[in-house]
Amino acid sequence: MIQLLNRRDFIGRTAVAGAVSAGLYVNPVAAGESKSPNEKLNIAAVGVAHKGEHNIKQLTGQNIVALCDVDSSYLTRLSAQFPKARTYRDYRKLIEAEHNRIDAVVVSTADHNHAPATVRALSAGKHVYCEKPLTHTVHEARLVARLATKNKLATQMGTQIHASNNYRRVVEVIQSGAIGPVTRVYNWCNKNWSGGRFEKWNKPTPANLDWDLWLGPARKRAYSPHIHPANWRRFWAYGSGTFGDMAAHIMDLPFWALKLRYPTRVAARGPEVDPVGTPKWCMAEYDFPARGDLPAVKFYWSDGGRHYGLVKQTRDRRNRPLSRWGLGVLFVGEKGMLAADYGHYELFPQERFSGFTPPKQTIPNSIGHWNEWVRACKTGSPTTCNFDYSGALTETILLGVVAFRCGQTLEWDAPNLKTTNTTAAERFVTKHHRAGWDV
C-alpha cells in the first residue's frame, strides 16, 4: 500500500521518481496542480466494461490517460478508442506507475474491489469517482469516507439518479412540509439478483481473463464460469444481490430529503440464508433517530417482488397499486403521502392534493453527475454524492445485508461501528482481504 500522505507532500516526495516499476516514464510535474477550471483532468479508469465504459464516455471532455481491466477483450476495445492511454491489468500497478501523471481515478469494478482500488487512489492523493455501492462492507464504507475527508479530495459515488430534476423536486416538496413531518418511508425494487453457484470448470481459464486479478481481495479459488462479467452480484463474495445493487439509487432519495445518517436498529428477513448466493427476496426494517426538529423515522426496504401492505394498497393515478411500479419510494407524513420513482412523483390522497402547487425551486438543477465531480476536482466545489454522504448511505444499505445474513436484529452503535446486542454480525461488518489487497 502507498503510505497515506496529503496531496502536496505526496507530489513533493515523488516528483523526482522518473522511471517506476512498470518501466514507464512519469512526467515529474503533477498534471493536477493547475488551478484553472478550463484545464482538462488526467483521468485513469479502473474497470472499462459495461458501466465502466459508460462512465468513461461521460468524461471524454477530459484526458483519459490510463485504462485498467482484468479482461483483455474489454481493455483492447477501449484502448482502440483511446489509443494514447496506457493500459494495465492490475490497478495497484496503475496507481503506482501513474501517480504523478493522473489527477483522478474512476472505479467501475465489481463491488469487492471498490474499496481496495479507491483506498489506493485516495491514499495517492487522487480524486475518485466510484460506482455504487461505495464498498462491499460496512467497515470499508467508513474507512473510505474518512480517508476522502482527511485528504480533502473531490469524490462522487455513481448514483446518477441523484442528479435528476425529479429527485430534486421531491426533496423540495418533502422539505417544504407539504405532507407534514415524515415518520415512515417504504423503499422497494422488483428486480432480482440471486442464486449464485460456483461451478466446476475443467478447461483452461479463458485466455482474455486474469482470474486471480479479478478475485483481487477475495479468497483465492478456482475459476468458475458465469460470474464475470455479468453475474457477480449473485454472489456474497463479490456483491450483495438486489439490495446492494439497487438500494443505493432508491434509498438515496429519502436519505437526502429527510437528512438521514445512521440507523440505530436494523432487522431483515427473507428465504433461508445461503452461504454462497444472494436471496430471491429480502425485506428490511430500520429505525432512524430524530434529527433536530425532524422526527424519528421507521424505514423499510423490500426487493424481489415482495412488498409491505401500504405499498400494495395505495393506488396511483392509473389505479394501479404502487407495487406495480418497478421501483419506488413512499413517504408517509402526518398530512399525506408522496410516492416517487426515478421520473415522477404523486401525492396522496389524490383528492386532498388536487391542484397542488409545488414549492419554489430551491435546489439548482444539476450540471450533470459526472460534470459535478469534474468541476469539484478542478475548483474544490462540493459534490452532492461525496463519500461522506454516500459512505453513510452505503453503511445503511449494507447493515440491512448484515442483518439478513446473520439472522438477528442489530442494535447499532454507529460512532463505534459495532453492534451492542450480538457478536454474530462482526464477520459481516468487516471481512478478510487477501494478502496484497488489504485496505
Image: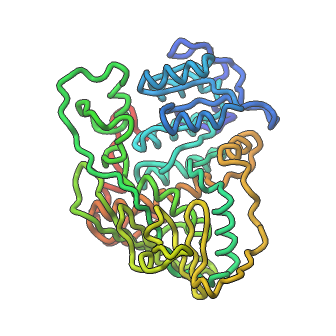
Compared with residue 179, is residue 429 higher up or lower down, i.e. above or below? Answer: above
Q: Position of residue 292 (x, y in %)?
A: 63, 79
The residue drawn where x is 37% and y is 32% is: 214
Q: Taking the image as drawn, is residue 27 in sight?
A: yes
The residue drawn where x is 42% and y is 27% is: 70
Q: Position of residue 215 (x, y in %)?
A: 34, 34
Q: Position of residue 133 (x, y in %)?
A: 48, 51
Q: Taking the image as drawn, is residue 264 in sight?
A: no
Of residue 416 and residue 45, the one placed in the foreground of this image is: 45
Left or right, 222 with reference to 263: left
Q: Residue furthest front?
A: 318
Of residue 135 and residue 348, the one placed in the foreground of this image is: 348
Compared with residue 122, is residue 75 higher up or lower down, i.e. above or below? Answer: above
Left or right, 183 with reference to 174: left
Compared with residue 28, is residue 106 higher up or lower down, i.e. above or below? Answer: below
All told, the count of numbered labels is: 0
Left or right, 108 with reference to 277: right
The color scheme shown is rainbow
Of residue 208 and residue 314, the one placed in the foreground of this image is: 314
Q: Position of residue 49 (x, y in %)?
A: 48, 32
Quarter occupied by residue 419: bottom left
The residue drawn where x is 71% and y is 81% is: 355
Quarter of the picture holding the C terminus: top left
Left or right, 41 with reference to 217: right
Quarter occupied by residue 95: top right
Quarter occupied by residue 413: bottom left
